[in-house]
Image: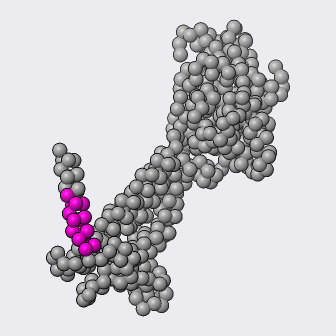
């Protein structure tokens, strides 16, 4: 295994009030690789993902213990600027959530809030991001139309383009294809594989075939605990634990 | 059945208003009525020009809008987005309590407390004027504007806020660029409803605006807005006299004003309607 660790957590505990949602989770995320987080509903995989860009901060009454490191810096350290962190660690959500603005404005938004003022540069990055997200051809003639007129699959790729526009180092994806039809899902998966040459991707998925198809490494969560993490091939063919085997063969979950 | 009854009753009131009001135009033309500068309904010959009254209403509403709109919207943003839950829990009922305050109490407050105060503060002869009435009306419309805007802001989908935060936007940027545009239709409705409450409000302007039917020169001049004229003079106007009909015609003008306000509110809420979350 490569030693090039982009992000990792060590003994991460997470609490919603008095309820502990994560126990002692330690995972390493290798640079330019795709890591899938799998497990049954309510196992804490989404909560874990949202710890990595401090999205959980928006909920009141939460508490995090342990370490979550990005490039050997603790992201929960008081000196960390959350706004900068979220620019470096982008996120794509389960349901496509484009802003009720034009397609162009959707992509340009992230640039504008990060202080890019040069119009030519914004136009250039918007085009580049849309190309990266493989949606440019479909939207290039309707940049000023509302993003809400796009189909679900297109909206989700637009959201990916929006996340890419601010040039993140890590991309978190929370079941990005769960609300999409098979063809749109396939497009998103191809996109993930393509993007992984440039960034570190962490994807939560319900779909084990999807995890097997797109990821290099897979982590299996159950009841807020990390059960097993390994190379995807190994985890799916020779799981180390009985519990993992039962889940991936569909005996529970 | 009950709905039908109330609709019938309301339309009968409207028909009555128009029948009683329109006959004044046998004596003066519509143009003279609306643009006439002099309102001397009891003189002989009487003058029925309501321009001063319209301007009085307009000034008072406009000034109260200037005070109430920013205050109401900012309070709403604070309550929906910034305030810690415990503070919001206390402040929200207080704002709603303000909305249910009887207007006569507010008018009385303006007359007895605010009037002497601004008289001294600005060193002017009378404390009952546009400024005082606007202040009291603003006091009345802030709760309306605030609570309706707050609902609109609160109903902006969390998914949109999260998307904005995830791109590295600050809370302030998210409020200004995402939350406010997404709730603009609700905010516009809130403003119009707040203002139409101010236009039609009678007791406060009757007590605090000073009651002089003349075209105001500054915000410290007393005025007599439309509703105040009706309330003050109706009891003195002989039944079915010209004066009586003129007051009903003022009622028509007032009715048209509030109708226009409501139409604008309706139009704006459609124009800025945005579908929040993506639909599949």
Q: Of residues B173 and A217, which is closer to you in this image?
A: B173
- Measured as percent of width and height from the top left, residue B22 is found at 25, 68
Give the answer, above or below, for where A144 lies relative to B153: above
x and y percentages locating residue A176 in the rendered image = 62, 27
Does residue B13 show up magenta in the picture?
A: yes
- Residue at image coords 55%, 34%: B278
Q: Quadrant of the N terminus of chain A?
A: top right
Q: Is residue B276 left or right of residue B101?
A: right
Q: Is residue A145 visible?
A: yes
Residue occupying the point 68% across, 29% down: A138
Q: Tell me residue A221's x, y (percent).
A: 61, 22
For the point 40% across and 70% down, which residue is it? B137
Residue at screen point 53% across, 16% down:
A253
Q: Is residue A69 visible?
A: no
The image shows residue B218, relative to residue B12, as above or below, that is below
**What residue range appears in magenta?**
B12-26
**Which quadrant would residue B100 be assigned to in this image?**
bottom left
- Residue B67 lies, with reference to residue B264, above or below; the image says below
> Residue farthest to the right?
A3
The answer to if B205 sits in the magenta stretch is no
Q: Main secondary structure of the magenta part?
A: helix
């Amino acid at each position: 295994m490569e030693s090039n660790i982009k992000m990792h957590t060590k003994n991460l505990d997470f609490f919603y009030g008095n309820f502990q949602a994560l126990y002692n989770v330690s995972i390493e995320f290798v640079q330019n690789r795709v890591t899938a987080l799998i497990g049954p509903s309510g196992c804490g995989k989404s909560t874990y993902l949202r710890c990595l860009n401090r999205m959980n901060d928006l909920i009141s009454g939460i508490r995090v213990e342990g370490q979550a490191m990005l490039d050997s810096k603790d992201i929960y350290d008081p000196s960390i600027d959350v706004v900068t962190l979220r620019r470096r660690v982008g996120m794509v959500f389960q349901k496509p959530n484009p802003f009720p603005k034009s397609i162009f404005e959707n992509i340009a938004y992230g640039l504008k809030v990060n202080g890019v003022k040069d119009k030519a540069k914004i136009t250039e990055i918007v085009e580049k991001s849309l190309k990266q997200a493989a949606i440019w051809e479909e939207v290039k003639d309707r940049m000023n139309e509302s993003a809400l007129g796009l189909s679900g699959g297109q909206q989700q790729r637009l959201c990916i383009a929006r996340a890419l526009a601010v040039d993140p180092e890590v991309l978190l994806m929370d079941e990005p294809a769960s609300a999409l039809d098979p063809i749109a899902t396939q497009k998103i998966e191809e996109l993930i594989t393509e993007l992984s040459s440039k960034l570190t991707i962490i994807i939560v998925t319900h779909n084990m075939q999807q995890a097997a198809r797109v990821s290099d490494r897979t982590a299996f969560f159950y009841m807020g605990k990390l059960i097993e993490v390994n190379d995807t091939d190994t985890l799916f063919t020779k799981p180390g634990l009985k519990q993992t085997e039962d889940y991936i063969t569909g005996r529970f979950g | 059945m009950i709905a039908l009854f109330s609709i019938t009753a309301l339309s009968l009131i409207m028909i009555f208003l128009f029948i009683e009001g329109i006959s004044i135009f046998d004596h003066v033309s519509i143009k003279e009525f609306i643009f006439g500068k002099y309102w001397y309904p009891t003189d002989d010959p009487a003058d029925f020009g309501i321009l001063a009254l319209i301007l009085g209403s307009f000034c008072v509403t406009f000034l109260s809008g200037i005070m109430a709109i920013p205050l109401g919207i900012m309070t709403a943003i604070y309550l929906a987005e910034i305030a810690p839950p415990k503070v919001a829990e206390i402040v929200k009922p207080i704002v709603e309590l303000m909305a249910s305050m009887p207007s006569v109490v507010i008018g009385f407050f303006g007359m007895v407390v605010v009037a002497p105060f601004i008289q001294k503060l600005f060193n002017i002869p009378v404390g009952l004027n546009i400024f005082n009435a606007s202040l009291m009306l603003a006091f009345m419309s802030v709760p309306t504007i605030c609570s309706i805007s707050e609902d609109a802001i609160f109903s902006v989908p969390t998914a949109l806020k999260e998307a904005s935060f995830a791109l590295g936007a600050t809370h302030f940027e998210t409020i200004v660029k995402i939350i406010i545009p997404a709730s603009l239709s609700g905010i516009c409705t809130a403003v119009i409803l707040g203002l139409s409450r101010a236009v039609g409000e009678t007791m406060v302007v009757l007590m605090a605006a000073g009651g002089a039917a003349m075209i105001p020169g500054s915000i410290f001049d007393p005025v007599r807005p439309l509703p105040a004229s009706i309330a003050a003079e109706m009891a003195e106007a002989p039944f079915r006299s010209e004066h009586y009909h003129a007051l009903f015609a003022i009622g028509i003008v007032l009715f048209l004003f509030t109708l226009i306000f409501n139409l604008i509110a309706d139009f704006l809420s459609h124009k800025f309607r945005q579908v929040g979350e993506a639909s599949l």
